[in-house]
């Protein structure tokens, strides 16, 4: 059988630290091809090349044995490739039916410039009945939940009968029932001889619909085969790869008394009834897949997002953290996952950024002591090896690693007792990474406690004393340093449970 | 060789011989005469000696006091390195401290610890540690180099071979990726190589100025270390190199502002 879509030696440099390398893959008609890999293994990037959002650096793409050039999403659409994104491309103010038939233009009578709403809605309702989707075709899309929008996206793709349909983690937000609907649609698409490329973190999806599996790791395809006779253990082994955790500068430091206790913390939908504690001088790791609630948890403890119920105790005393000012006053520091959006003032200079949470310390009554501010900044840029051309340039001109160190410096100066770091090393250069690990060490030896949120399993194993693995808003396992291994973390990340270990 | 070390040697020689000439020192220490003159100038500023044509004589009035040392410009860096090192030493550990000022700082830091056995060929380190009777000190035999107060030679190496330790803190003078870890004298390098053979874990300690420098004699290849302890301002390429080659790199600094 000839492949419908064939990728030959595709290479693409995504960033200085990550590229897709020599991707060779074949996709056959009527098959669901599941693409599995850890966070940031390159799954989405690869799909964006097929869908025309990214240009490949080199390599060839063949459709039905003919080489094609995909230079834009339009090119890709012309070929019959349709991609369902993690973020949506629906029109919020249009009805479901309008959204579904928008691209096929099936019911627009162009000569009269009118749309046959009646038949459009009735076909939409028939479609929903067929797949047991309980939605009214006339509802505006903006009223739908995240998962419902996902189903509308899939239904829309189904109506267009694409040659190739790419689904980027469609199942991660769906309930069991909704997943069933999704899998039924996929089965129908298979009957229509479409190629389904299904990106997933979840191994159970593979058993439900996969005909073929490919595993991506660090930008390379490391395994590709029909799914027959493939045990979950084998898949996890292939996904995880080498253990690189020994390169991390880890100091063994005896931890002290309990400093933070989180009791029955619930935040709307993302997570509920979380219980854990943190000891003085401890590095507590929190990991989980995208959407497991790890970032939301940090935002809730730091007071950015409201909590619905539950209590936070510091040093055994209940504290009511209503906002970030409360948490700073309680000596909690926080490094956000997206430092550009809410971690730094990109268009202010280094001293202003470093002293932002510390204005009380550097002001004498009403005025800021400029010379003190400068002295403080000079001291810390030297200590943290922050490289800059001019102290008073906007920090937007600095590298990501140096920006991250500035973000850390401000919490060091404010002498945070608890520092919550959300993906502190993502996308930064190795030298800065090493610096950040050493900054963490220094803070811990001086008595601070660290909550390190990361999806980099090596980093988690390399640096943490204890690790909470989150799965869909629950702690699926707490692992101590002696019990840490890549296999275990991944198993609890995808929640295979104890009997599979 | 670094200024502090050179100055220490010059002072030792002067105390011994009372006078010294520049060209002899220059050959002995393998540095230019200009450098020697600059060192002598510094010592003159401290009233330790008086410069003469082509040399220097010791000031008679100077009491020959062992504590009289020129301020070590890297003292703070060494202290920071030693505090990281002290976190690596646990009760019941048997360790090596090789000769050097940084290791001397480590010795001072671990004085409060109990049940530690230290094998060292540096008499200054041994003397520092001797104030705590809970620390067992083992000295090998050998030839005494009185300018550094260290032991070396065949006897030292043979003695060292009788032991096995869990961690060796090896202080070096130069680190580059091509030449690995280097020190100034052949005898020292040879002793250090014996130490590397009898340790489970090799921990290289060196302040940041030693990076990108090659000293006279090679101790070991760059990949032979398990851990490095230094300061944050080393060149980025070393941070990359050690991380990518699975060698733990500790960069020590003090997060408390000095006196603020």
Image (cartoon, coloured by chain):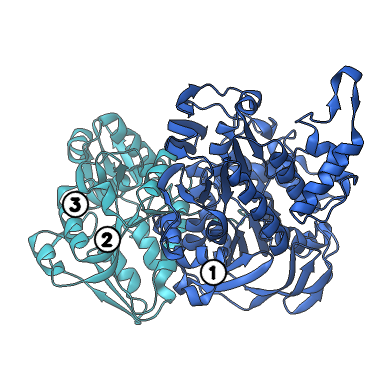
Chain colours: A blue, B cyan
The correct choice, above or below, for A159 with respect to B70 in the image is above
- Give the residue pinned by disc 2: B98
Numbered disc 3: secondary structure: helix
Disc 2 sits on a residue from what chain? B
Question: On the image, numbered disc 3 is attached to which residue?
Answer: B189
Quadrant hosting residue A377: top right
Q: In this picture, is A200 found above or below B216?
A: below
Residue carrying label 1? A496
Asked whether B106 or B90 is in front, the reply is B90
Total labels drawn: 3
Residue B114, image x, y percentages: 39, 80
Tags 3 and 1 touching, CB below 8 Å: no
Pointer 2: residues within 10 angstroms few (<14), some, or many (20+)? many
Q: Is residue A440 left or right of residue A213?
A: right
Q: Residues within 10 Å of mark 1 (few under 14, many from 20)?
A: some
Instruction: Between label 3 and label 1, give the one nearer the viewer.
Output: 1
Instruction: Looking at the picture, tell me which residue is in the foreground, A245 or A124.
Output: A124
Side of B170 where A430 appears, left or right: right
Q: Position of residue A89 (x, y in %)?
A: 75, 37
- Going from N to C along the chain, the mark reached first, 3 or 2, is 2
* Alpha carbon separation for disc pair 3 and 1: 54 Å
The N terminus of chain A lies in which quarter of the figure?
A: top left
Q: Quarter-wise, where is residue A450 in the image?
A: bottom right
Residue B201 lies, in percent from the top left, at: 29, 64
State how far apart marks 3 and 2 are (Cα): 11 Å
CA distance separating discs 2 and 1: 50 Å
């Amino acid at each position: 059988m000839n492949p419908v879509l064939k990728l030959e030696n595709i290479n693409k440099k995504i960033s200085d630290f990550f590229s897709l390398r020599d991707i060779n893959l074949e996709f056959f008609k009527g098959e669901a091809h599941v693409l599995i890999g850890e966070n940031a293994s390159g799954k989405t990037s690869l799909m964006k090349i097929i869908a025309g959002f990214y240009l490949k650096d080199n390599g060839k793409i063949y459709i039905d044995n003919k080489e094609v050039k995909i230079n834009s999403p339009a090119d890709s659409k012309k070929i019959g490739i349709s991609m369902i994104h993690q973020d949506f491309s629906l029109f919020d103010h249009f009805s479901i039916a309008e959204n579904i038939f928008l691209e096929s233009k099936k019911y627009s009578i162009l000569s009269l410039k009118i749309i046959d709403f009646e038949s459009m809605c009735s076909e939409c309702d028939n479609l929903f009945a067929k797949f047991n989707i309980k939605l009214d075709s006339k509802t505006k899309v903006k009223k739908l939940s995240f998962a419902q929008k996902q189903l509308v996206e899939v239904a829309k793709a189904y109506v267009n009968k694409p040659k190739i349909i790419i689904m980027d983690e469609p199942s991660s937000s769906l309930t069991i029932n909704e997943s069933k609907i999704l899998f039924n649609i996929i089965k129908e698409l298979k009957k229509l001889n479409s190629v389904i490329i299904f990106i997933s973190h979840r191994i159970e999806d593979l058993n439900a619909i996969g005909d073929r599996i490919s595993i991506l790791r660090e930008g390379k395809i490391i395994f590709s085969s029909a799914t027959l006779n493939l045990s979950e253990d084998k898949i996890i082994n292939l996904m995880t790869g080498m253990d690189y955790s020994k390169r991390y500068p880890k100091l063994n430091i005896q931890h002290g008394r309990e400093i933070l206790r989180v009791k029955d913390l619930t935040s709307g939908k993302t997570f509920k009834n979380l219980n854990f504690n943190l000891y003085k001088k401890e590095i507590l790791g929190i990991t989980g897949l995208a959407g497991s609630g790890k970032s939301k948890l940090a935002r809730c403890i730091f007071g950015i997002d409201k909590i619905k119920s539950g209590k936070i105790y510091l040093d055994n005393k209940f504290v009511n953290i209503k906002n970030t000012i409360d948490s700073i006053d309680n000596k909690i520091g926080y490094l956000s996952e997206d430092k550009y959006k809410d971690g730094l003032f990109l268009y202010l200079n280094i001293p202003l950024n470093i002293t932002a949470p510390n204005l009380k310390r550097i002001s004498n009554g009403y005025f800021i002591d400029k010379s003190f501010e400068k002295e403080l900044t000079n001291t810390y840029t030297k200590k943290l090896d922050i490289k800059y051309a001019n102290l008073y340039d906007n920090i937007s001109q600095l590298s990501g690693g140096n920006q991250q160190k500035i973000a850390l410096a401000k919490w060091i100066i404010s002498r945070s007792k608890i520092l919550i770091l959300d993906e502190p090393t993502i996308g930064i250069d190795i030298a800065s990474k090493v610096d950040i690990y050493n900054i963490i060490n220094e803070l811990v030896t001086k008595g601070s406690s660290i909550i390190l949120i990361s999806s980099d399993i090596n980093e988690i194993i390399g640096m943490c004393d204890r690790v909470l693995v989150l799965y869909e808003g629950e702690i699926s396992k707490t692992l101590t340093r002696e019990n840490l291994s890549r296999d275990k973390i991944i198993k609890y990340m995808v929640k295979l449970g104890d009997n599979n270990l | 060789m670094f200024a502090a070390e050179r100055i220490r040697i010059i002072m030792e020689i002067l105390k011994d011989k009372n006078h010294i000439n520049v060209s002899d020192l220059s050959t002995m220490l393998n540095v230019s005469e200009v450098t020697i003159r600059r060192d002598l100038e510094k010592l003159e500023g401290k009233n330790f000696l008086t410069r003469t044509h082509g040399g220097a004589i010791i000031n008679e009035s100077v009491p020959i006091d062992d504590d009289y040392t020129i301020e070590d410009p890297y003292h703070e860096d060494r202290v920071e390195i030693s505090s990281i090192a002290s976190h690596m030493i646990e009760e019941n550990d048997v360790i090596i401290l090789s000769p050097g000022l940084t290791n001397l700082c480590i010795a001072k830091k671990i004085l409060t610890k109990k049940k530690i056995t230290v094998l060292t060929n540096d008499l200054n380190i041994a003397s520092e540690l001797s104030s705590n009777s809970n620390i067992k000190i083992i000295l090998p035999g050998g030839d005494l180099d009185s300018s550094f107060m260290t032991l070396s030679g065949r006897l030292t190496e043979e003695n060292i071979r009788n032991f096995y330790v869990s961690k060796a803190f090896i202080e070096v003078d130069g680190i580059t990726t091509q030449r690995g870890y280097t020190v100034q004298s052949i005898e020292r390098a040879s002793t250090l190589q014996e130490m590397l053979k009898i340790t489970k874990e090799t921990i290289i300690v060196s302040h940041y100025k030693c990076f990108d420098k090659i000293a006279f004699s090679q101790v070991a290849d760059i990949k032979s270390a398990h851990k490095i302890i230094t300061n944050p301002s080393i060149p980025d390429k070393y941070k990359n190199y050690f991380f990518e080659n699975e060698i733990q790199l500790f960069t020590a600094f003090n997060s408390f502002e000095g006196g603020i």
